[in-house]
Amino acid sequence: MAAYDNLDRPFLAGEWRKGTGDTLTNLCPWDESTIFEMPGATPADVDEAFEAAAEAQKEWAKLPPSARAAKMHAIADIIEARKDEIAGWIVREVGGTKLKAALELMLVTQVVRTEAASLPFMAEGAILPEDLPGKESRTYRRPVGVVALVSPWNFPLQLTARTLFPALALGNGVVVKPSSDSIVTGGTIFAAIAEEAELPPGLVAVLPGSGKAIGDAVVQHPIGSVVSFTGSTPVGRKVGQAALKSDKLKSLELELGGNSPIVVLDDADVDYAVEASVWGKFIHQGQICMIANRIVVEDKIYDEFAEKFVARTKKLVVGQREDPACMVGPVINRDQLDKVMELIGKSGATKALGGEADGLVIPPHVFTDVAEDDALVANEIFGPVAPIQRARDEEHALKLANATEMGLSSSVFSRDEGRALRFARQVQAGMTHINDQTVNDSPFSPFGGAKNSGIGRFNGRWAVEAFTATHWISVQHEKRQFPFSADDVPG
Ligand code: NAD
């Protein structure tokens, strides 16, 4: 099986095209070398891609559920067969560690084989109670048509896959705009997989290009029915506003930034909470939307937790590209490094662990006694930096947990599950995990945020809601008496 060799160009209308737009440079974060340069897609390509997807979608939607499910299994087979090739791209293109690549591939395989292959059988309608004599009310579900998908660079394989395959499985076409930092792993690798799986030509298009060059064209295209965007809150706001300005009304799925807390209550198993928190803070060097941005610990166990957290963090393998146990690799690019270093510079907290960056690898940092308004807790860090906040008591811990405009993930540790559940139910977030860290995704559980972390949910029945439209069809089985006078209206 030869490796894919055409991943440096747009794919649309069933063909690989030479881009004619602005030049994009694909850099490897491990050594900042250039992987390739390519001209990106243009608004004219966007037009053609949507037209072709809409055409291909008509026949695709008519296939029986088992035929679409079979294609999802074929895609999962391809992903499994090309596991090493894809993992190699995750390491090279987004600076993933081997551990991150393995985890991302596991999640994507679940999305395709477990979730997407089941979805064609989950698009159920209903027969509804009806008061009118002789009338039957039914609901049918149909695909929305073509989905516009815009994805970020941090977990690009998973964050593209979790819209792409469910939307396809439910009978839609998809036009993908990956981030320019993950052209292959968020984009063109999926075009190659779709081609190899012999999906109908045109059904999937992948258009690398900057947000400035083609963002509005993708988001506002009159054929697109749903915009599925994953990325930062500021860009998500802009995308939402642009979509609403389109001549065609669209529904929005916005999965945005996070500032997720781990809360460790005073009756927690401290050693376990430390182990989980170190993982949930430093995996992929902190560049995950649902990463533990901050850790809130009750005063009674604070010093013990902080000391053990620093000791455990010191044992992490850092900056070793080939080591399967490497936990912390490079951040995505220089801009990101500068942003993280700036936040570190602004912090007034006590630095318990730090060090100099080597290339784009920032060694794990730990800060203790972090104030409520410290730069490290007020912002999404997206880097390997752990601020640990001291909470006076449980009430204060809850106040600190909720002191953010974001509300993506969260977690709480306690030996008393009842106490943890009462706490969890007061956390203003889309997801809260008891006795686990914040990074969790599961193919049939609702993934999404509250507050400014977004609108909409992924996975399972929530994907059916997102990527199908409900059609109410009523049948009047016998002639109705129409009320032509107010006196004839019942009630
Ligand atoms: P970003 O918002 O900078 O970019 C995301 C995507 O939007 C990219 O493809 C980018 O090219 C595109 N884009 C930029 N301007 C656009 C425009 N005007 N119109 C259309 N598209 C445009 O985000 P990023 O830096 O790639 O990713 C990191 C951010 O994503 C973090 O804030 C992180 O929390 C968030 N994120 C959220 C989730 C989630 O599920 N909630 C998951 C992963 C990442």
Image (cartoon, helix red, strand yellow):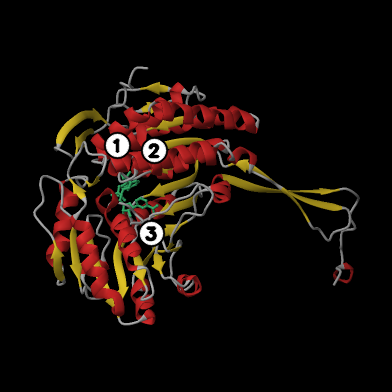
Does 293 appear above or below 70? Answer: below
Which residue carries the number 3 mark? 438
Crowd rating for badge 3 (residues with CA inside 10 Å; few <14, some 14–19, many 20+): many
- Seen from the viewer's position, the closer of residues 214 and 290 is 290
Question: Is residue 64 or residue 75 the one in the foreground?
Answer: 75
Q: Which residue is mark 2?
A: 105
At label 3, which amino acid type do we have? Thr
Q: Are marks 1 and 3 in contact (CB under 8 Å)?
A: no
- Of pointers 2 and 3, the one earlier in the residue sequence: 2
Q: Where is residue 243 shown, x and y percent of the image?
A: 43, 50
Tell me the element at label 1.
helix
Mark 1 or 2 closer to N-term?
1
Q: Which amino acid, by three-letter code, is at mark 1?
A: Ile
Figure quadrant of residue 123: top right
Residue at the image point whose x is 84% and y is 53% from the top:
135
Badge 1 vs badge 2, beta-carbon distance below 8 Å:
yes
Residue 442 is tagged as: none
Q: Nearer the viewer, residue 174 or 300?
A: 300
Residue depicted at 32% across the width and 34% down the height: 87
Q: Position of residue 370 (x, y in %)?
A: 21, 73
Task: Specify the quadrant that holds the N terminus.
Answer: top left
The amino acid type of the residue labelled 2 equals Leu
For the residues bearing labels 2 and 3, Cβ distance under 8 angstroms: no
> Where does label 1 land, which residue?
90
